Amino acid sequence: QSALTQPASVSGSPGQSITISCTGTSSDVGGYNYVSWYQQHPGKAPKLMIYEVSTRPPGVSNRFSGSKSGNTASLTISGLQAEDEADYYCSSYTSSSTLVVFGGGTKLTVL
Amino acid sequence: QVQLVQSGAEVKKPGASVKVSCKASGYTFTRYYIHWVRQAPGQGLEWMGIINPSGGSTSYAQKFQGRVTMTRDTSTSTVYMELSSLRSEDTAVYYCARSGGNSGSTLDYWGQGTLVTVSS
Protein backbone atom coordinates (compact mmCIF):
# COMPACT_ATOMS: atom_id res chain seq x y z
CA GLN A 1 0.00 0.00 0.00
CA SER A 2 1.46 3.33 -1.13
CA ALA A 3 1.76 6.25 1.24
CA LEU A 4 0.02 8.66 -1.15
CA THR A 5 -3.30 7.82 -2.80
CA GLN A 6 -3.87 8.29 -6.52
CA PRO A 7 -6.66 7.05 -8.79
CA ALA A 8 -5.61 3.93 -10.65
CA SER A 9 -6.64 5.31 -14.01
CA VAL A 10 -8.00 8.37 -15.78
CA SER A 11 -8.84 8.97 -19.39
CA GLY A 12 -9.62 11.80 -21.75
CA SER A 13 -9.96 12.64 -25.41
CA PRO A 14 -7.41 14.65 -27.38
CA GLY A 15 -7.77 18.34 -26.63
CA GLN A 16 -9.55 17.81 -23.35
CA SER A 17 -8.20 18.46 -19.85
CA ILE A 18 -7.77 15.92 -17.10
CA THR A 19 -6.80 16.15 -13.45
CA ILE A 20 -5.03 13.53 -11.33
CA SER A 21 -5.29 13.77 -7.57
CA CYS A 22 -2.75 12.76 -4.94
CA THR A 23 -3.91 12.54 -1.33
CA GLY A 24 -1.61 12.32 1.64
CA THR A 25 -1.52 13.59 5.19
CA SER A 26 -0.31 16.58 7.16
CA SER A 27 3.04 14.79 7.52
CA ASP A 28 3.69 14.91 3.81
CA VAL A 29 1.53 16.59 1.15
CA GLY A 30 -0.32 18.85 3.55
CA GLY A 31 2.68 19.88 5.58
CA TYR A 32 5.12 20.93 2.90
CA ASN A 33 5.14 22.50 -0.55
CA TYR A 34 7.37 19.73 -1.84
CA VAL A 35 5.11 17.73 -4.10
CA SER A 36 6.52 16.44 -7.39
CA TRP A 37 4.93 14.74 -10.37
CA TYR A 38 6.63 12.26 -12.70
CA GLN A 39 5.64 10.90 -16.10
CA GLN A 40 6.69 7.38 -17.05
CA HIS A 41 6.25 5.81 -20.46
CA PRO A 42 6.43 2.00 -20.72
CA GLY A 43 9.97 0.70 -20.36
CA LYS A 44 11.38 4.16 -19.65
CA ALA A 45 12.67 5.95 -16.60
CA PRO A 46 10.40 8.45 -14.88
CA LYS A 47 10.65 12.08 -15.97
CA LEU A 48 10.13 15.05 -13.67
CA MET A 49 7.16 17.15 -14.82
CA ILE A 50 6.32 19.32 -11.80
CA TYR A 51 8.16 20.03 -8.56
CA GLU A 52 7.48 22.08 -5.43
CA VAL A 53 3.74 21.76 -6.14
CA SER A 54 3.55 23.91 -9.26
CA THR A 55 6.97 24.58 -10.79
CA ARG A 56 7.74 23.21 -14.24
CA PRO A 57 11.34 22.25 -15.06
CA PRO A 58 12.80 23.74 -18.24
CA GLY A 59 11.47 22.03 -21.33
CA VAL A 60 8.22 20.76 -19.82
CA SER A 61 5.13 21.90 -21.69
CA ASN A 62 2.97 24.54 -20.04
CA ARG A 63 0.04 22.20 -20.64
CA PHE A 64 1.12 20.57 -17.38
CA SER A 65 0.26 22.37 -14.17
CA GLY A 66 0.19 21.50 -10.48
CA SER A 67 -1.67 22.72 -7.43
CA LYS A 68 -2.40 21.78 -3.84
CA SER A 69 -5.21 22.19 -1.35
CA GLY A 70 -4.84 20.81 2.13
CA ASN A 71 -3.63 17.23 2.00
CA THR A 72 -4.41 16.79 -1.71
CA ALA A 73 -2.22 17.76 -4.63
CA SER A 74 -3.35 17.75 -8.24
CA LEU A 75 -1.78 17.51 -11.67
CA THR A 76 -3.74 18.99 -14.55
CA ILE A 77 -2.94 18.29 -18.17
CA SER A 78 -4.70 20.53 -20.65
CA GLY A 79 -5.01 20.07 -24.40
CA LEU A 80 -4.44 16.31 -24.11
CA GLN A 81 -2.20 14.79 -26.74
CA ALA A 82 -1.58 11.18 -27.65
CA GLU A 83 1.99 11.44 -26.34
CA ASP A 84 0.65 12.24 -22.86
CA GLU A 85 -0.53 8.65 -22.48
CA ALA A 86 1.67 7.30 -19.70
CA ASP A 87 1.77 6.50 -16.00
CA TYR A 88 1.94 9.45 -13.62
CA TYR A 89 3.33 9.35 -10.10
CA CYS A 90 3.17 11.95 -7.38
CA SER A 91 5.70 12.17 -4.58
CA SER A 92 6.18 14.28 -1.51
CA TYR A 93 8.75 15.11 1.09
CA THR A 94 7.76 13.49 4.37
CA SER A 95 8.71 14.20 7.95
CA SER A 96 8.86 10.49 8.68
CA SER A 97 12.14 8.58 8.52
CA THR A 98 11.38 7.92 4.83
CA LEU A 99 12.44 11.13 3.12
CA VAL A 100 10.31 10.61 0.03
CA VAL A 101 6.94 8.93 -0.42
CA PHE A 102 5.30 8.07 -3.73
CA GLY A 103 1.76 7.58 -4.85
CA GLY A 104 0.70 4.31 -6.39
CA GLY A 105 0.59 5.78 -9.88
CA THR A 106 -2.18 6.69 -12.31
CA LYS A 107 -2.47 5.33 -15.82
CA LEU A 108 -3.58 8.02 -18.24
CA THR A 109 -5.31 6.81 -21.38
CA VAL A 110 -5.85 9.21 -24.27
CA LEU A 111 -8.93 7.94 -26.05
CA GLN B 1 24.09 17.82 -20.00
CA VAL B 2 23.33 15.93 -16.83
CA GLN B 3 23.56 12.16 -17.25
CA LEU B 4 23.30 9.24 -14.89
CA VAL B 5 24.43 5.97 -16.47
CA GLN B 6 23.75 2.74 -14.61
CA SER B 7 25.33 -0.68 -14.85
CA GLY B 8 23.74 -3.53 -16.75
CA ALA B 9 21.13 -6.10 -15.86
CA GLU B 10 21.89 -8.71 -13.20
CA VAL B 11 20.56 -12.17 -12.42
CA LYS B 12 21.10 -13.37 -8.86
CA LYS B 13 20.13 -16.35 -6.77
CA PRO B 14 18.16 -15.96 -3.54
CA GLY B 15 20.43 -15.09 -0.64
CA ALA B 16 23.04 -13.43 -2.83
CA SER B 17 23.96 -9.75 -3.04
CA VAL B 18 23.88 -7.32 -5.94
CA LYS B 19 25.78 -4.08 -6.44
CA VAL B 20 24.47 -1.54 -8.94
CA SER B 21 26.51 1.45 -10.08
CA CYS B 22 25.43 4.90 -11.23
CA LYS B 23 27.98 7.12 -12.96
CA ALA B 24 27.22 10.85 -13.01
CA SER B 25 28.38 13.42 -15.53
CA GLY B 26 27.52 16.92 -16.70
CA TYR B 27 27.48 18.54 -13.25
CA THR B 28 29.54 18.83 -10.07
CA PHE B 29 29.16 15.37 -8.54
CA THR B 30 29.57 16.40 -4.92
CA ARG B 31 26.92 19.14 -4.99
CA TYR B 32 23.84 16.95 -5.39
CA TYR B 33 22.57 14.02 -3.34
CA ILE B 34 21.62 10.82 -5.14
CA HIS B 35 18.45 8.81 -4.44
CA TRP B 36 17.79 5.14 -5.18
CA VAL B 37 14.28 4.08 -6.17
CA ARG B 38 13.03 0.67 -7.28
CA GLN B 39 10.05 -0.53 -9.29
CA ALA B 40 8.87 -4.12 -9.20
CA PRO B 41 7.31 -5.50 -12.40
CA GLY B 42 3.97 -3.82 -13.03
CA GLN B 43 4.18 -1.94 -9.73
CA GLY B 44 4.81 1.61 -8.55
CA LEU B 45 7.90 3.45 -7.40
CA GLU B 46 9.47 2.72 -4.02
CA TRP B 47 12.06 4.97 -2.37
CA MET B 48 15.04 3.12 -0.95
CA GLY B 49 17.41 5.74 0.32
CA ILE B 50 19.75 8.64 -0.35
CA ILE B 51 23.48 9.34 -0.29
CA ASN B 52 25.43 12.56 -0.02
CA PRO B 53 28.29 12.19 -2.52
CA SER B 54 30.26 14.87 -0.73
CA GLY B 55 30.67 13.29 2.69
CA GLY B 56 29.19 9.86 2.02
CA SER B 57 26.41 10.13 4.61
CA THR B 58 23.34 8.03 3.94
CA SER B 59 19.73 7.64 4.97
CA TYR B 60 17.80 4.47 4.21
CA ALA B 61 14.11 3.63 4.18
CA GLN B 62 13.28 1.56 7.23
CA LYS B 63 12.19 -1.33 5.02
CA PHE B 64 15.74 -1.76 3.71
CA GLN B 65 17.71 -1.00 6.87
CA GLY B 66 20.32 -3.67 7.43
CA ARG B 67 20.14 -4.96 3.84
CA VAL B 68 21.13 -1.94 1.75
CA THR B 69 24.41 -0.08 1.57
CA MET B 70 25.00 3.03 -0.52
CA THR B 71 28.53 4.23 -1.21
CA ARG B 72 30.30 6.59 -3.54
CA ASP B 73 33.62 7.04 -5.32
CA THR B 74 34.33 10.71 -5.90
CA SER B 75 37.31 9.94 -8.14
CA THR B 76 34.97 8.43 -10.74
CA SER B 77 31.75 10.33 -9.89
CA THR B 78 30.01 7.05 -9.23
CA VAL B 79 27.57 5.96 -6.56
CA TYR B 80 26.78 2.36 -5.71
CA MET B 81 23.81 0.59 -4.20
CA GLU B 82 24.33 -2.88 -2.74
CA LEU B 83 21.38 -4.98 -1.64
CA SER B 84 22.04 -8.20 0.26
CA SER B 85 20.07 -11.30 1.24
CA LEU B 86 18.14 -11.10 -2.00
CA ARG B 87 14.72 -12.73 -2.30
CA SER B 88 12.34 -13.07 -5.20
CA GLU B 89 10.43 -9.97 -4.09
CA ASP B 90 13.56 -7.91 -4.81
CA THR B 91 13.16 -8.51 -8.52
CA ALA B 92 12.75 -5.00 -9.86
CA VAL B 93 14.22 -2.19 -11.91
CA TYR B 94 16.50 -0.10 -9.73
CA TYR B 95 16.94 3.59 -10.55
CA CYS B 96 19.35 6.21 -9.31
CA ALA B 97 18.17 9.81 -9.48
CA ARG B 98 19.72 13.16 -8.70
CA SER B 99 18.23 15.23 -5.91
CA GLY B 100 17.19 18.74 -6.96
CA GLY B 101 14.93 21.52 -5.74
CA ASN B 102 14.94 23.09 -2.30
CA SER B 103 13.89 20.11 -0.20
CA GLY B 104 16.12 17.39 -1.55
CA SER B 105 13.02 15.34 -2.32
CA THR B 106 12.78 16.35 -5.98
CA LEU B 107 14.32 13.75 -8.29
CA ASP B 108 15.27 15.85 -11.29
CA TYR B 109 17.40 13.51 -13.40
CA TRP B 110 17.13 9.72 -13.51
CA GLY B 111 19.36 6.92 -14.66
CA GLN B 112 18.11 4.49 -17.28
CA GLY B 113 17.41 1.80 -14.69
CA THR B 114 18.99 -1.58 -13.92
CA LEU B 115 16.91 -4.75 -13.95
CA VAL B 116 17.78 -7.10 -11.12
CA THR B 117 16.21 -10.53 -11.36
CA VAL B 118 16.29 -12.84 -8.35
CA SER B 119 15.63 -16.43 -9.31
CA SER B 120 16.84 -19.86 -8.34
Image (cartoon, rainbow, N blue to C red):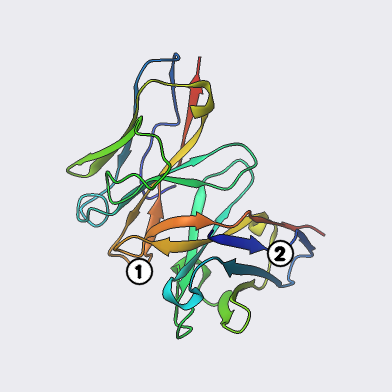
| Residue in the picture at 39% in, 61% down | B100
Q: Chain of mark 1?
A: A
Number of the label disc, if any, that sits on residue B7: 2
Neighbours of disc 1 within 10 Å: few (<14), some (14-19), many (20+): few
Taking the image as shown, residue B20 lies to the left or right of residue B28, namely right
* Element under disc 1: loop
Which amino acid, mark 1? Answer: Ser
Q: Is residue B86 above or below residue A1?
A: below
Q: Does label 1 lie on the same chain as label 2?
A: no
Along the line of sight, the residue nearer the viewer: B90 or B103:
B103
Residue lying farthest to the right in this orientation: B120
* Element under disc 2: loop
Mark in front: 2 vs 1: 2
User: Image quarter for residue B18?
Assistant: bottom right
| Residue in the picture at 27% in, 43% down | A54
| Residue in the picture at 52% in, 69% down | B64
Indicate the position of residue B35 as horizontal and vertical percent values: 48, 65
| Residue in the picture at 79% in, 65% down | B13
User: Image quarter for residue A65?
Assistant: top left
Indicate the position of residue A78 as horizontal and vertical percent values: 35, 24
Indicate the position of residue A32 as horizontal and vertical percent values: 22, 56
In space, the residues marked 2 and 1 are separated at their CA atoms by: 28 Å
Which amino acid, mark 2? Answer: Ser
Q: Which residue is labeled 1 in the image?
A: A97
